[in-house]
Amino acid sequence: MWFTGKKDNDGEKQYAAGMARLNEKSPRADQAAFANFSKAAQLGHIEAILELGFSYFKGRGVERSEDKAIEYYKLASDKGNGNAAFNLAVMAMKGEGMQINLSLAKQWGLLAEQRGNPRASGLLVMINYGLETERMEAEVGAAAFQKPFFKSKDSTVEDEYSAGVKFLQRGDMNSASRHFAAAAKEGHTSAYYNLSILWGSGAVTPYDFDAAADCWYKAAAAGHPKAQESIWLLEAADRGGFGSNNLAALALKQGRNGNVLQSEVMVCAARFFDVICKKYGATNDVISYELDAAATSDWSFIHDFVKRTGVDKSFYDGGLDRLTEGSAADQVTDGLNEISVAMSQAGYDQNLVVMARCSIVGYIVLKSPYGNRSEPLRGVDTFFS
């Protein structure tokens, strides 16, 4: 290629001139900026190469070309630019300039994350969920989806479901959720099952364990093979007969689910621990212990979670010291520890492990007398913001 690989003062000057011209916001200025970026790129200026890619993608000062955008993004990425890798991941995820390819999108996304792009983690959440959906559909098999309960006779309902699948493939979880919900409202079995995973994994806000469980039950009742295969987990959790050791083992067995949480583990854990707290009168002690512990954290997103519970500090202050060893509340907090350790061993980073614990505790708060002051639980798309 014609790039020198150097970033000298002349290249920096041309790049700065191009950025300044963009601020003029006119077609003539865009063309002049493109010329500046081209000169800077010839001198090896990486950000200028990135801007050339963006110019071609948007048709900014030059005729729009997704192929040329990909070419320049790849050049910038080859030189270590994380933003270029991020843009390539988005294009592969959405099928812009290429066929939709979630595996390729994940490769670019991971590269962007390694290079410090701040939006890469959120993008990977969407990509990984899309990959999980593809895997799920493949496992059930095309033949299974020919059965009457997988396909609605109402074309409008089926269109809603198909739209949900397309948005999943693009990584747009919120749009997928809306379309699946519309299809599920009319009894679409596959929509129920997809929602049980989407809502149970915390991919969208609000993070609604009960809605996920309801969809799981409905999918199983309608004959979805995957839901029927796993529904005993939820039934055991809801009668308080699961056990934290079994939840930890399930977390290890299922392994990391990309950058979202394990839907079966999370839904079962939240509902199981709430049942146990109510059965043994441990709710207040668990809430006060967990929130007092959370209040000692150095992480601001944990303090934000505590505030969203709406529980007054006077209630949980000192909760760490009030827990009686061997009590039901002590066993619940030990169980939460077991699950946290198992998730760490399964490969989850510490942020998601902490989010999982906060979400379970937040659910216990929501189901308690203090729940009327609590905000809805948040998914990974908003929990850390």
Image (cartoon, rainbow, N blue to C red):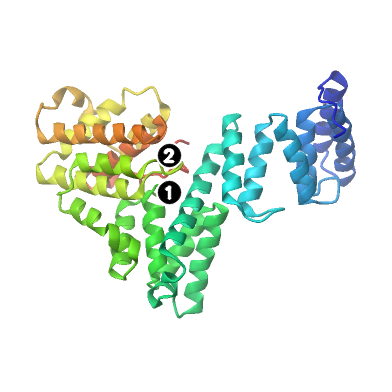
65 left or right of 207 in image? right
Report if the CB atoms under discs 1 and 2 are less than 8 Å apart: yes
Residue at horizontal 27 percent and vertical 26 percent from the top:
293
Count neighbours of disc 2 (C-alpha within 10 A) and say few if under 14, some if 14 to 19, many if 20 or more.
many
User: Does 83 appear above or below 44?
Assistant: below
Which quarter of the figure is the N terminus placed in? top right
Q: Position of residue 215 (x, y in %)?
A: 33, 61
- Residue 365 visible, this angle: no
Query: Looking at the rendered structure, which numbered label has been put on residue 176?
Result: none
Residue at horizontal 85 percent and vertical 25 percent from the top:
11
- Secondary element under disc 1, as helix, strand or loop, is loop
Q: Where is residue 165 in the image (x, y as percent from the top left)?
A: 51, 62
Which three-letter amino acid code belongs to the residue tagged 1?
Thr
Q: How far apart are marks 1 and 2 (CA)?
A: 8 Å
67 left or right of 244 in image? right
Residue matched to label 2: 383
Rendering quarter of residue 234: bottom left
Which three-letter amino acid code belongs to the residue tagged 2?
Phe
Q: Position of residue 350 (x, y in %)?
A: 39, 30
Rendering quarter of residue 245: top left
49 left or right of 331 in image? right
- Secondary element under disc 2, as helix, strand or loop, is loop
Q: Which residue is at the far bottom?
A: 153
Residue matched to label 1: 205
- Residue 109 visible, this angle: yes
Q: Which of marks 1 and 2 is nearer the N terminus?
A: 1
| Numbered label tally | 2
Q: Where is residue 323 in the image (x, y as percent from the top left)?
A: 14, 27
From the viewer's side, name the closer residue of 94 and 232: 232
Residue at horizontal 53 percent and vertical 42 percent from the top:
124
Count neighbours of disc 1 (C-alpha within 10 A) and say few if under 14, some if 14 to 19, many if 20 or more.
some
